[in-house]
Image (tube, rainbow, N blue to C red):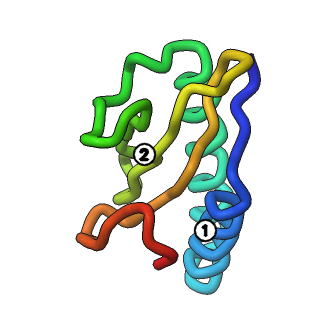
Amino acid sequence: MKPSFSRRALAQIAEIEATIAAENPSAAASFVRRIDRLAALLARRPELGRATNLDGVRVMPARPYPYLLFYALASAGGITVLRVRHMARREDWRSGR
């Protein structure tokens, strides 16, 4: 099953990639590959992430990068990545930041 990404998640990934690329373009490409591989793994095995306090939303760290992938099970199977957030941020994950 192929994972899908919300518009917000795609925008966040692009923003993170651009920020990393300003200092190290190859690291930025590695970051995007890591996100894609992790999302593909989670689409096959969604139970790997831990449950959040929101119904149906799970989270998985994107190690070695300091980011978290928030995702939900898709209605047709697989997952939808909802948001990508830096681990140090403490705001509500649903907010626009």
Q: Nearer the viewer, residue 26 or 16?
A: 16
- At x 66% / y 40%, what residue is drawn? 36
Q: Which residue is mark 1?
A: 12
The amino acid marked with disc number 1 is Gln
Is residue 20 toward the left or the right of residue 11 in the image?
left
Which tag is nearer the camera, tag 1 or tag 2? 1
Amino acid carrying mark 2 in the image:
Ala
Residue at 53% x, 25% y is 42
Q: Quadrant of residue 87?
A: bottom left
Looking at the image, which is closer to me, 37 or 68?
68
Mark earlier in primary sequence (1, 2): 1
Can you name the residue that lies furthest to the bottom here? 22
Q: Is the C-beta separation of discs 1 and 2 under 8 Å? A: no
Tell me the element at label 2: loop
Which residue is more in the foreground, 69 or 23?
A: 69
On-image quarter of the N terminus: top right
Q: Residues within 10 Å of mark 2 (few under 14, many from 20)?
A: many
Is residue 53 or residue 27 the one in the foreground?
53
Residue 57 occupies which quadrant of the picture? Answer: top left
Which residue is label 2 attached to? 62
Identify the residue at image location x=45%, y=46%: 70
Identify the image quadrant of residue 41.
top right
Between the C-alphas of marks 1 and 2, the distance is: 14 Å
User: With 15 as the anchor, is 7 left or right in this view?
Assistant: right
The number of discs equals 2
Residue at horizontal 58 percent and vertical 81 percent from the top: 19
